[in-house]
Image (cartoon, grey):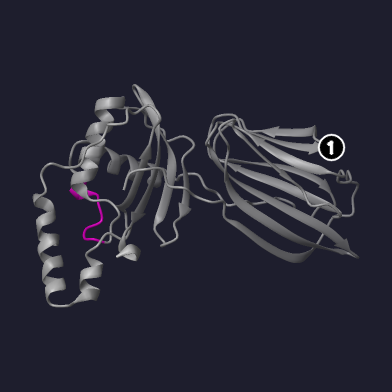
């Protein structure tokens, strides 16, 4: 399948009681909100933890979400009122400048920004927990992730996608199509110009596959990639670029690689093995069969 994978922000909430410091603190502002500024389309992890003092302890609850900055490079959200304190944290996977801005009555009162990739920004107001670090999930790539992704991309780019694609019909992408896809990308956008994979993020897909998302920079443009890995091999690949012409990709002319599956499908249907036949369809269309 080709196209940009739409992903909604995943939000989770947790809560508990902990001891807190009774030292001086700046009270939280009323009508507060926060804004994240950065590269358009960049994905970051955001966490907001609210604190309420109860004697010598503080109760808290936290909301976390994975958000994509809009086309203007912005994400903004209101903060809950009526709490004794809060902490806002942002996990930043890019070396490009990302700012976390606290606003009161829509006026900026504090700004934090990164000086490198793979950092966490945090702003606190009001009652704080004794260990007040807000540890939002790290969504940046590890070195092994980056090396494996580049190996897969390089292998597919030279026409050897069979070596890196999940075998069988459980994959959302097949090797011949992927080979043609990379050939068409190279023809229109050139070779990969930036191999750092800066700003790429990792997440878990709904079916449990390891998901990765980010921009690939080419000699003559760039495109957004979302891919899935299962046991180290490619199970999904989605690519989108506004710099590609409408007719940039064509389907394979040689269909010999699909003949085996076609024969198996016909045999299964002929023998009324409908469960077996269904497994031969791509996961992307099984629900519609």
Pick whichever, 276 or 32, lies toward us: 276
- The x and y percentages for residue 217 are 39, 29
Pick whichever, 129 or 242, lies toward us: 242
Residue projecting furthest to the top: 220
Q: Which residue is mark 1?
A: 105
- Label 1: how many residues lie within 10 Å, few (<14), some (14-19) or many (20+)? few
Q: Does any portion of residue 190 appear in the rendered image?
A: no
Which residue is located at x 57 percent, y 55 percent? 10
- The x and y percentages for residue 132 are 74, 52
Task: Tell me where residue 222 sits by quadrant.
Answer: top left
- The x and y percentages for residue 166 are 25, 56
Which residue is located at x 52 percent, y 36 percent? 41
Which residue is located at x 79 percent, y 50 percent? 86
Q: Does any portion of residue 204 appear in the rendered image?
A: yes
Residue projecting furthest to the bottom: 272
Q: Is 274 rendered above or below residue 147?
A: below
Relative to 258, is 151 on the left or the right? Answer: right
Under circle 1, the secondary element is loop
Relative to 254, is 35 on the left or the right? Answer: right
Q: Is 261 rendered above or below residue 138?
A: below
Q: Main secondary structure of the magenta part?
A: loop
What range of the chain is rendered magenta?
161-169
Pick whichever, 41 or 14, lies toward us: 41
- Asked if residue 224 is among those painted magenta in the image, a careful observer would answer no
Task: Tell me where residue 216 sits by quadrant.
Answer: top left
Number of callouts in the render?
A: 1
Q: Is 168 rendered above or below residue 242?
A: below
- The x and y percentages for residue 133 are 70, 50
Which residue is located at x 89 percent, y 46 percent? 27
């Amino acid at each position: 399948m080709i196209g940009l994978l739409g992903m909604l922000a995943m939000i989770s909430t947790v809560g508990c009681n902990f001891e807190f410091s009774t030292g001086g603190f700046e009270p939280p502002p009323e009508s507060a909100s926060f804004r994240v500024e950065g590269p358009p389309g960049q994905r970051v992890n955001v966490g907001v933890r609210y604190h309420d003092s109860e004697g010598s302890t503080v109760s808290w609850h936290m909301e976390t979400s994975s958000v994509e900055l809009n086309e203007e490079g912005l994400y903004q959200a209101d903060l809950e009122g009526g709490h004794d304190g809060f902490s806002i944290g942002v996990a930043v996977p890019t070396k490009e400048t990302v700012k976390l801005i606290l606003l009161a009555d829509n006026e900026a009162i504090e700004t934090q920004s990164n000086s490198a990739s793979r950092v966490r920004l945090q702003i606190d107001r009001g009652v704080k927990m004794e260990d007040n670090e807000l540890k939002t999930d790290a969504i940046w790539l590890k070195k092994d992730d980056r090396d494996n992704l580049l190996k897969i991309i390089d292998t597919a780019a030279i026409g050897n996608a069979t070596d890196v694609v999940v075998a069988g019909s459980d994959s959302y992408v097949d090797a011949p199509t992927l080979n043609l896809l990379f050939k068409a990308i190279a023809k229109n956008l050139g070779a990969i110009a930036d191999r750092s994979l800066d700003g790429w993020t990792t997440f878990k897909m709904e079916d449990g596959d390891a998901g990765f998302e980010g921009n690939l920079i080419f000699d003559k443009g760039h495109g957004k990639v979302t891919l899935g890995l299962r046991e180290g091999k490619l199970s999904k690949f989605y690519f989108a670029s506004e710099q590609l012409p409408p007719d940039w990709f064509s389907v394979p002319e040689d269909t010999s690689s699909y003949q085996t599956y076609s024969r198996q499908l016909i045999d299964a249907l002929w023998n009324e093995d409908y469960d077996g036949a269904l497994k031969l369809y791509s996961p992307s269309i099984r629900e519609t069969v």
